[in-house]
Image (spheres, helix red, strand yellow):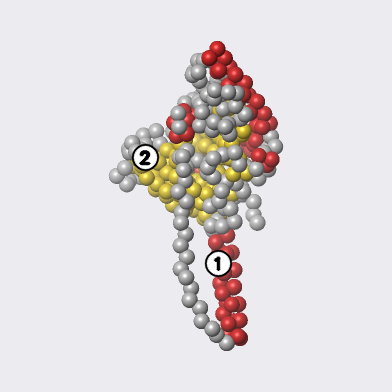
Amino acid sequence: MNRDQLLDAIGNTGESMLKETEQLRLNAAVNDATVTRNAVATTRRPARRKMMILLAACMILLLGTVAAYAAGWIGGRGGRAETGTNEEGEALFKYYPNEDMRVPITAITGNILNCTAQMKENWRILSAGNQLTPYAAPLPDSSSIPFIVSTGFNTVTEAAAYIGYADMVLPQFAQNTAPSYAYVQAIGTDPVEPHALLSAQEPDYLLCWMKLEACYALDGITVYLDNYVITEANEEPRAILSTAISNVPQEVEFVSDTATANNREFVVITEQNIDGSVDEDVVRKEYIWAENKVEYHLSIRYDVNDETTAAAEAIIADWMNSFPNE
């Protein structure tokens, strides 16, 4: 089983806890964008003129840096999105944060660190009696893959504390409102056999991937929060590369746009019909942001009317403005 197949299998783990429209896929490699720089020809100038040019250049660079930082282009903030289809013609989009998202394992301080011990126990159960298939025996957490552990919580505050990453941000409405469900999913990797579903020898799992997900039903509005954190044990510098947010992905397409708020430029993915028309009765959007090595997704679905539209806009604004001012 390769990594793409593995992450497809994750979608079948804890089915009741996962939102029905999400499919996760990680690609085996990331094609980094290549930046080309034009050479600048310079000539000798009188000393004073040269100084003035240098000062002007510094001012332009400084102003450009401030503007770029405010827009989330540098400083480890923000990212870009690509939309398209997969090999089966299903609509998907990819999000690329502007920096390597891996954090040191020492930055994770919560009880999620104990998951690796549970992963080892899962492996022992599966491998007992030469049962070399991950579906041969039940696991303590009802998972079918030894190095995936899901844990449920009553609030997102509890879920975030379980991860213990100090820079993770939670919107105020999520902290004060009971979710329909909230859980944390942890994925481990074996450095010796990182792609093995069931290793021949007892693995030494390392925590490499974490997702906090919560679902809210707020006055006719469905909201999903997904926060992703990866560690230095992860092979790739991105948490999630491809996402399909529709349960009829071959009948829709995704359009990428941006929304600016709180000195940040958020990526906005809108689902529309394959003919380019937007359902005027239902809104399906996903807002994405990356900051301090956390990838944030806010997915929102609601029927269009004055009341729900105003409420949805307030939820989105709350989420966007939850990130601290600098």
Q: Nearer the viewer, residue 17 or 306?
A: 17
Q: Which residue is mark 1?
A: 64
Relative image position of residue 127 (x, y in whole percent): 55, 17
Q: Quadrant of residue 46?
A: bottom right
Which residue is located at x 65 percent, y 35 percent? 163
Relative image position of residue 289 (x, y in whole percent): 54, 48
At label 1, the amino acid type is: Gly
Which residue is located at x 47 percent, y 30 percent? 6
Q: Is residue 3 left or right of residue 61?
A: left
Asked if residue 204 shows in the view, the reply is yes
Relative image position of residue 171 (x, y in whole percent): 61, 43
Relative image position of residue 305 (x, y in whole percent): 43, 42
Q: Nearer the viewer, residue 316 or 62?
A: 62
Which residue is located at x 58 percent, y 34 percent? 191
Q: Residues within 10 Å of mark 2 (few under 14, many from 20)?
A: few
Q: Nearer the viewer, residue 27 or 164?
A: 27
Q: Which mark is residue 28?
A: none
Q: Which one is closest to the eye, mark 1 or mark 2?
A: 2
Quarter placement of the N terminus:
top left
Quarter placement of the C terminus:
bottom right
Asked if residue 145 shows in the view, the reply is no
- Seen in the picture, residue 301 relative to 323 is either above or below; the reply is above
Which residue is located at x 58 percent, y 17 percent? 125
Q: Residue furthest left?
A: 275
Q: Residue furthest top?
A: 129
Secondary structure at badge 1 equals: helix
At label 2, the amino acid type is: Asn
Q: Which mark is residue 86?
A: 2
Which of the marked residues, 1 or 2, is nearer the chain's N terminus?
1
